[in-house]
Image (cartoon, rainbow, N blue to C red):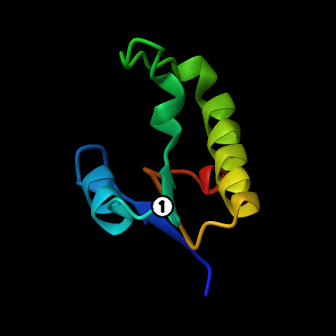
Amino acid sequence: MKNIILIRGLSGSGKSTLADLIVGNDPNKGEVCADDFFVDEKGDYKFDFEKLKEAHAWCQQECLSMIEEGLDTIVVHNTFTRKWEC
């Protein structure tokens, strides 16, 4: 059975921690969040509100790529404060 799990919550509520626990080191599971879009090549997080819609589109594309790869479980962990973000 294939699963997509959406984790929704406020910033700092443990979404990433829960996603990490679900995915673990299983190569058949993956996780993604819009915040990943704002991490540069050095690993620094640089949020830009003006690029939020682009970040969510990127997150959706990453999720679709994982589906195409055939992963069994995909965890998407975002705040999902607005309907369009889901």
Instruction: Answer above or below: position of 77 versus 6.
Output: above
The outermost residue toward the top is 42
Instruction: Examine the image and state in which quarter residue 51 appears.
Output: top right
Q: Where is residue 4 in the image (x, y as percent from the top left)?
A: 57, 71
Residue at which label 1 appears: 27
- Badge 1 local density, few (<14 within 10 Å), some, or many (20+)? few
Instruction: Answer above or below: position of 68 versus 12.
Output: below
Q: Secondary structure under badge 1?
A: loop
Q: In front here: 47 or 31?
A: 31
The outermost residue toward the bottom is 1
Instruction: Give the side of residue 29 with respect to residue 13, left or right.
Output: right
The quadrant of the image that shows the C terminus is bottom right
Q: Where is residue 46 in the image (x, y as percent from the top left)?
A: 42, 15
Amino acid tagged 1: Pro
The quadrant of the image that shows the N terminus is bottom right
Q: Which residue is drawn at 70% across and 39% down?
A: 57
For the question of whether residue 75 can be seen, the reply is: no
Q: Residue at x 67, y 51 (%)?
A: 84
Q: Residue at x 62, y 43 (%)?
A: 59
Q: Which residue is drawn at 38% across and 20% down?
A: 45
Instruction: Give the side of residue 16 with respect to residue 63, left or right.
Output: left
The outermost residue toward the right is 68
For the question of whether residue 26 can be seen, the reply is: yes
Q: Where is residue 68 in the image (x, y as percent from the top left)?
A: 76, 60
Q: Where is residue 55 in the image (x, y as percent from the top left)?
A: 61, 32
Instruction: Answer above or below: position of 53 versus 48.
Output: below
Q: How many labels does the image show?
A: 1
Q: In front here: 9 or 27?
A: 27
Instruction: Answer above or below: position of 7 versus 82.
Output: below
